[in-house]
Image (tube, rainbow, N blue to C red):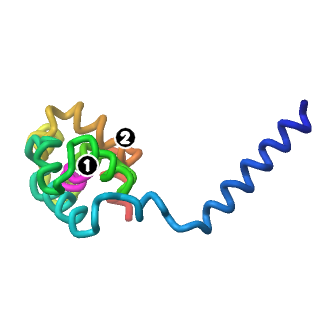
Amino acid sequence: LHDLYGEGLLNALFASLFQIDQPDTARRRSPLSRRKLRLVTDYIDAHCLDRIRLADLAALTGLSETAMSHAFKAATGVPPHRWQMQARVDRAKAMMARDAASLGDIAEATGFFDQAHLTRVFKSIVGLTPGAWMRSTSRQ
């Protein structure tokens, strides 16, 4: 039994090593061209403080909402909503670095429901709470 388990692990390791050298076929098969992907990411970045509907993004690409969502994730590695949250966190980071505003004010200015929502999303993306991130950047 242990030999079978070890052999299975070894096979999985070799399979993953061989995939490293393979071209990213998911990216090539994506129905989103580079131009359309850029349109969508630019739109999300420009409107990240707004409520972005999947239908609006799909209209930019000419795809259905489902196809656009799947193609976006295949091309970027994250769903559109996560891209939007990353853009909001980036804006929050910029505000924290230059302003003395409270986290509540920053949360409101960057499209989060409240400070707790900002903190939860910030930690899920950055790996640190906003306070810990500010302390770590002030030491550098």
Name the residue at 80% across, 49% down: 10
Looking at numbered disc 1 in the image, what kind of residue is underneath it? Answer: Met
Which label sits in the foreground, 1 or 2?
1
For residue 54, above or below residue 39: above
Name the residue at 15% across, 32% down: 114
Q: Which mark is residue 35?
A: none
Q: Position of residue 87 (x, y in %)?
A: 22, 53
Q: Position of residue 104 (x, y in %)?
A: 14, 37
Name the residue at 61% across, 68% down: 21
Label 2: few (<14), some (14–19) or many (≥20) C-alpha neighbours in 10 Å: few
Which span is picked out in magenta?
86-92
For residue 69, above or below residue 115: below
Question: Looking at the rendering, in which quadrant would you find the C terminus?
Answer: bottom left
For residue 8, above or below residue 24: above
- Toward the viewer: 101 or 46? 46
- Toward the viewer: 134 or 119? 119
Question: Looking at the rendering, in which quadrant would you find the N terminus?
Answer: top right
**Whether residue 87 can be seen here:** yes
| Res 51 quadrant in image | top left
**Which residue in the structure is indicated by mark 2?**
124
Q: Position of residue 61 (x, y in %)?
A: 18, 56
Looking at the rendered structure, the secondary structure element under dot 1 is helix
Which of marks 2 and 1 precedes in the sequence?
1
- In screen coordinates, is 61 left or right of 119? left
| In the image, residue 3 lies in the stretch drawn in magenta | no
**Which residue in the structure is indicated by mark 1?**
68
Looking at the rendered structure, the secondary structure element under dot 2 is helix
Name the residue at 13% across, 43% down: 55
| Whole-number angstrom distance, CA of label 1 to CA of label 2 | 24 Å
